[in-house]
Amino acid sequence: MSSRIFSPPGSSASRLDGLLAAASWPIDPGRELRALVDAGCDSLPLPGSGGTLDRWRAFARVGAADLALAKVFEGHTDALAILAELGASPLAPRGSRWGVWCAEPPRNRVAIAIRPGGGVTLHGVKAWCSGAACLTHALVSGWDGEGRPCLAAVSLRQAGVTLVDAGWKAAGMGAAATVNVRFDRTPAIAVGAPNAYVDRPGFLHGGAGVAACWFGGVTRIAQRLRAGAPSDPHRLAHLGAVDIAVAQARAMLRDAADAIDARPADRCALATARARLATEAAAEEVLRRAGRALGAGPLCHEAAFAQAVADLPLFIRQSHAERDQAAHGAIVAGLAEPPWAL
């Protein structure tokens, strides 16, 4: 298997913009992901490589086009980054499309067992597997016999892999086709040592990258408000507030990207948490104000806009809300000096 080669930001960005512009509504995330991968648009700078902001700009572009596509595109490129960070890039052949399935709800735990002849097997049901039907491979978290968190790379085109469609009930993010996947002693390859996935610096770097996808959706909705507020003073007031919220989130994302590139071996917990929480707050503010400013018309008559407004609240729930705020507050409280000097 050949390893991935990451191309310069400009070449990938131009291809990405061209394909997104050509995509017709409604967007099929599986079809468009394959087109992006085949065109090499997944060859993004790795986190901490000096091009983290370029990487996140790509996520924001995709998120502005379609959040369900951004979900699977970010997952695929995150898998490539994880493989690179853990020294396993040769596991990703050209043209493969990956997911990162590492949610750990208590009722769905996958056992990872060592095979006598080498490799590992996966057994159990994995929840929250976005894009499962359109992917070729996945990185799957699970637990070894000693109760340690582990990661494995698995081909989805083999016996022992069953998609369990429990039925997506939400109006938002339905196109991401998130299902459960059952593994029945499925052969896989261990990636990194136990605990390596959660202990690596890129664990938090990747979490901030997800916020760049949210940011793309935020700008899509904000731009619709901007286009619809030429003179009405109430709409202009909402637009002014939206601009502040979006600019604050953008600043935190840029600060986090700079921090990661300056200290790639550091988890950058303060900066990455600020980026996620600021973008989540911006999303909530923009959704509230856009609805009040624009009324029901665009929601009822503009399919792409209505879908973005349905998708974004669900996507940002990948954040853990007050739990994440509390964890961030604990970091701030533990600093030797207040972190707010101008």
Image (cartoon, helix red, strand yellow):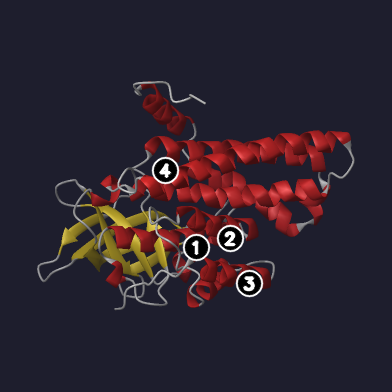
**Residue at x 41% of width, y 34% of height:** 270
The residue singled out by tag 4 in the image is: 259
The extreme left residue here reads 116
**Residue at x 67% of width, y 73% of height:** 22
Distance from the alpha carbon under mark 3 to that under mark 2: 11 Å
**Residue at x 58% of width, y 60% of height:** 62
**Kind of residue indicated by mark 2:** Val
Q: Judge the density around disc 3: few (<14), some (14-19), many (≥20) Cα neighbours within 10 Å.
A: few
Q: In the rendered image, which quarter contains the N terminus?
A: bottom left
The residue singled out by tag 3 in the image is: 18
**Kind of residue indicated by mark 3:** Gly
**Kind of residue indicated by mark 4:** Ala
Q: Judge the density around disc 1: few (<14), some (14-19), many (≥20) Cα neighbours within 10 Å.
A: many
The residue singled out by tag 1 in the image is: 73
Which of 174 and 260 lies nearest the eye of the viewer?
Answer: 260
Q: Is residue 43 above or below residue 268?
A: below
**Kind of residue indicated by mark 1:** Phe
232 sits left or right of 77 in the view: right
Distance from the alpha carbon under mark 3 to that under mark 1: 16 Å
Q: Which mark is residue 62?
A: 2
| Mark 3 or mark 4, whichever is nearer to me | 4
